[in-house]
Image (cartoon, rainbow, N blue to C red):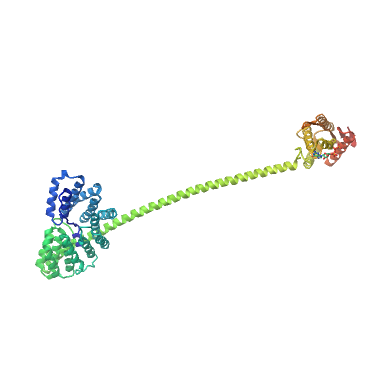
């Protein structure tokens, strides 16, 4: 973990060009390798700030933020980086600022913000075209993920960097970050060949901060492996360079390692001195693994010397640091998990929304389908009902028509023989019950065969219809009129005595005789004979009445036609 802290600020080197842009580039390049010069260049360019273009002013803002971060003014640095990310419109500068803001947030223990930003940075990775900006972003992501306790992901980012080293860059940073991640996995040995490869690459690249970080990692592993002599040899070798860079984490790490190594060697005074120097490097109360290790050395040394009071005091401080450090580690892990969970929840919510949307669309589709189906059903039902009604109507009409046909004569429309007889039965029955008078009149056209023969059958039909029409003019609603067949008709006259019945029969006869039919320009004369039977003489029996009426009719024919003959009392006929 010490190595992860050591790498929270990493830089690069470059060349000299004579222009504002070149000047800014040169300042950026030397910020780590020659920080004093960088600070001077920054002051110089601020003096000429008014002549800078907008793009150059944003670059200056970026260098200012970097300097704020380097000098520990994290709030100012963060404001600067966020300003650049949000407003500069320069994707390369925004990517670089995102990377550095990541390390600033981690350094100030705002882990949740840092990991949240790391999530955005991963998205940004796909958008950044500038190879260098992408490379830097990968580096910061690797550091942040390692810091969050996910060295395996950090290692993958470091390998992505190694696979795509931009022109002008070396393998220094990928190796450094890869070693840092591997250190966190506790699988790194101090003899790993990457140490020498990394130190050589970083030294060649003029990156003393990173080269020192690798050295210090190797010595740390040696201390942990209880090989203090070898560790001290490395520390002696890098001491000057570490002091020269003024990089705080490296300086404090080197001092604490030295204290531990001395203590392992039994050089307690040197150990005490180095450990006190390490804790003295902190201006503000803080908790980290360096102080923890320093207080542990102090506690061990004082305990061995029998100084129990200071030993106890150092032990308490050691315990505080240990607790603080562990809290910090778990805070990082918790923050990382919180961001992961939040991202997961957002993703799930988005999926849920999408699913709900799908469901809604499906429901709408189903509703539409249901509406369509209902409409179809309604239409179908209406059609079925319509056809049923139509069918019923037709059936009824057919029934009525059939009844009409079965009750009525097709040519004249009056009752046919059968229905006439049925009606007669009913009416006679009724008359009989009431003992009311009733007459039955039988009509038979005279020489109708001659009409057919002379004018044809169709004119004969027309004459038949004409006859019926004329007769109906003399009949009351309660009278029953029927065609018995051919040119023979019957009329039942309820409530009529013989005289009334005979009179009606004669009225019909006379009307017929006086009304020749005009058809197709032809005048056809027609007469009828009639026989009348009366209930008063024949009774209410249909057969008897019919028989008597027929007899009377026969009498009318026989006595010359075109006349009415009635059956009187005793069965005699009267014209
Ligand atoms: N045009 C037409 N002729 C019919 C119909 N039914 C019967 N006839 C005719 O009516 C005539 C009846 O003739 P007949 O029974 O000899 O009687 P008639 O000629 O009327 O002579 P009388 O009854 O003795 O006066 C026949 O020629 C039948 O063909 C019909 O529905 N239409």
Seen at 20% across and 45% down, the residue is 54
Q: Which of the pair 202/238 is nearer the observer? A: 202
Residue 101 screen position, x and y as percent: 22, 53
Q: Is residue 498 visible from the viewing direction of this image?
A: yes
Q: In which quadrant of the rendered image does the N terminus lie? A: bottom left
Above or below, 366 relative to 300:
above
Residue 440 visible in the current orientation: no
Asked if 377 appears above or below 309 in the picture, the reply is above
The mark total stands at 0
Q: Residue at x 50, y 47 (%)?
A: 371
Q: Name the spot of residue 280 as percent of width and height, x first.
A: 12, 59
Residue placed farthest to the top in the image? 514
Which of the two residues, 493 or 304, is positioned nearer the viewer here?
493
Q: In the figure, residue 432 lies in which quadrant?
A: top right
Figure quadrant of the C terminus: top right
Q: Position of residue 494 (x, y in %)?
A: 79, 35
Residue 100: percent from left, percent from top: 21, 54
Q: Quadrant of ligand 1?
A: top right
User: Which of the two residues, 7 or 210, is positioned nearer the viewer here?
Assistant: 210
- Res 572 → quadrant: top right
Which of the 4 image quadrants contains residue 197? bottom left
């Amino acid at each position: 973990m010490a190595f992860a802290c050591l790498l929270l600020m990493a830089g690069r080197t470059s060349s000299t060009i004579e222009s504002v842009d070149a000047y800014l580039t040169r300042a950026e390049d030397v910020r780590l390798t020659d920080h004093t010069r960088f600070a001077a260049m920054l002051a110089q360019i601020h003096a000429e700030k008014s002549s800078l273009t907008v793009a150059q002013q944003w670059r200056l803002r970026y260098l200012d933020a970097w300097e704020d971060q380097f000098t520990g003014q994290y709030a100012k640095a963060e404001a600067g980086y966020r300003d650049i990310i949000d407003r500069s419109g320069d994707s390369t500068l925004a990517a670089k600022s995102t990377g550095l803001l990541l390390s600033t947030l981690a350094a100030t223990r705002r882990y949740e913000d840092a990991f949240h930003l790391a999530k955005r940075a991963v998205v940004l990775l796909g958008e950044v075209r500038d190879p260098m900006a992408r490379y830097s972003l990968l580096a910061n992501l690797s550091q942040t993920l390692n810091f969050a306790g996910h060295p395996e992901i950090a290692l993958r980012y470091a390998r992505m960097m190694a696979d795509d080293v931009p022109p002008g860059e070396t393998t220094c940073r990928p190796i450094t970050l890869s070693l840092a991640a591997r250190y966190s996995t506790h699988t790194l040995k101090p003899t790993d060949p990457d140490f020498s490869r990394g130190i050589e690459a970083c030294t060649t690249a003029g990156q003393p901060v990173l080269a020192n970080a690798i050295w210090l990692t190797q010595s740390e592993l040696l201390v942990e492996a209880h090989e203090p002599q070898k560790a001290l040899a490395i520390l002696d070798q890098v001491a000057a360079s570490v002091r020269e860079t003024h990089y705080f984490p490296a300086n404090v790490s080197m001092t604490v390692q030295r204290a531990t190594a001395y203590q392992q060697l039994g050089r307690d005074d040197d150990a005490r001195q180095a450990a006190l120097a390490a804790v003295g490097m902190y201006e503000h109360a803080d908790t980290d693994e360096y102080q923890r290790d320093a207080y542990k050395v102090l506690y061990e040394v004082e305990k061995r010397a029998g100084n129990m009071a200071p030993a106890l005091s150092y032990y308490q401080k050691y315990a505080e640091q240990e607790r603080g450090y562990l809290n910090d580690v778990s805070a990082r892990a918790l923050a990382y998990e919180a961001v992961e969970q939040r991202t997961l929840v957002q993703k799930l919510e988005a999926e849920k929304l999408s699913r709900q949307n799908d469901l809604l669309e499906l429901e709408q589709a189903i509703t539409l389908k249901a509406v369509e189906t209902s409409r179809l059903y309604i239409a179908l039902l209406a059609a079925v009902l319509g056809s049923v009604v139509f069918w019923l109507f037709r059936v009824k009409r057919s029934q009525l028509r059939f009844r009409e046909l079965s009750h009525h004569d097709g040519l004249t429309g009056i009752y046919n023989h059968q229905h006439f007889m049925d009606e007669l039965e009913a009416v006679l029955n009724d008359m009989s019950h009431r003992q009311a008078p009733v007459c039955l009149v039988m009509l038979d056209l005279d020489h109708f065969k001659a009409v057919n023969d002379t004018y044809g059958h169709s004119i004969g039909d027309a004459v038949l219809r004409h006859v019926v029409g004329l007769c109906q003019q003399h009949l009351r609603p309660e009278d029953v009129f029927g065609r018995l067949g051919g040119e023979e008709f019957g009329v039942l006259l309820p409530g009529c005595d013989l005289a009334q019945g005979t009179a009606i029969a004669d009225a019909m006869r006379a009307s017929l005789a006086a009304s020749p039919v005009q058809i197709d320009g032809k005048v056809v004369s027609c007469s009828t004979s009639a026989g009348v039977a009366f209930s008063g003489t024949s009774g209410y029996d249909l057969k008897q009445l019919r028989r008597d009426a027929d007899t009377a009719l026969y009498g009318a024919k026989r006595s010359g036609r075109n006349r009415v003959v009635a059956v009187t009392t005793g069965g005699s006929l009267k014209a």
